Image (tube, coloured by chain):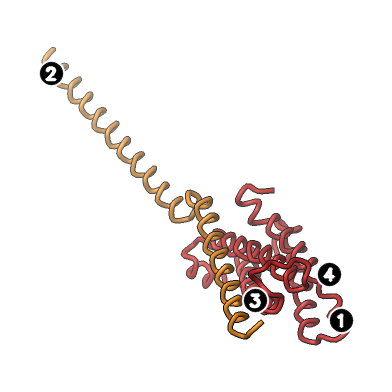
Amino acid sequence: MDDRSQARQLIGSLLVAALIVVVAIVVVTAKLGPTSAAELDAREDRLKQRIEQQEELTKQQQEARKERLERRDRGGE
Amino acid sequence: MEDLVDSLTRGNATEVKVVLASVVLALAVYQLALIAIAYGRVRPPFLHSRPAARAHRAIGDMLLVLIVVVALMCLAAYGWDDDGGAHAVIGAALLGALACKVAVVRRGGRLGRLLPLLGMTVFALLALTWLASAGDFLGVG
């Protein structure tokens, strides 16, 4: 077998190895995706934001109720 | 060291380690195929034994670097915690087997007969190390 053919086969083998690396990274990253630290942080931020919005809404509702009650009391007097 | 690993991986040291370890395992399986061709156990028409042996050597050198990097990341992130006892022991055995294999490859001579045994030992330890950490993390094994 000549040198050229051997070199071609060697390069082909190394290209297959590169392909294996790419496939392994894609498969494992796809499986890890939702558990990455960045994603977890983002999820935590979203949850915190939602809780804050809910607290704000509850506070507004309580204030509105309090105002209504005060107005009714004043009207009753 | 821990800070360096953390900043390089942007806080995803475990995930990066899992990806690297999985790449190493996938390439190790390919290494088995290459060495089988190099030793003439398998004779595919598209790959001769000599280029297969050279590719096995080149990929092996790269794998050695990757394994050492993963081991250093592991030590930096977790140290010698008791939690990963089995993983730490198998990992240390893997590094020892790898060192032996590299020494035998460099020395050559009669010890060369031990290479298939050492290669299989390295592969088995690699698979066990992966199963004890990355595999666990990915829900395999």
* CA separation in Å, label 1 and label 2: 101 Å
Name the subunit of mark 3. Answer: B
Q: Which mark is residue B111?
A: 1
Query: Residue under circle 3?
Result: B55
Name the subunit of mark 4. Answer: B
Measured from the top left, where is residue B2 in percent x and y?
56, 69
Give amino acid for label 4: Leu
Q: In this view of the protein, which residue sits in the foreground, B62 or B38?
A: B38
Give amino acid for label 2: Arg
**Residue at image x 49%, y 66%?**
B9
* CA separation in Å, label 4 and label 1: 11 Å
Marks 3 and 1 close (CB-CB < 8 Å): no
The chain letter corresponding to red is B
* CA separation in Å, label 3 and label 2: 90 Å
Query: Residue under circle 2?
Result: A74
* CA separation in Å, label 3 and label 1: 22 Å
Disc nearest the viewer among 3 and 2: 3
* CA separation in Å, label 3 and label 4: 19 Å
Which badge, 3 or 1, is on the more N-terminal residue? 3
Question: Do dots 3 and 2 share one subunit?
Answer: no
Query: Residue under circle 4?
Result: B117
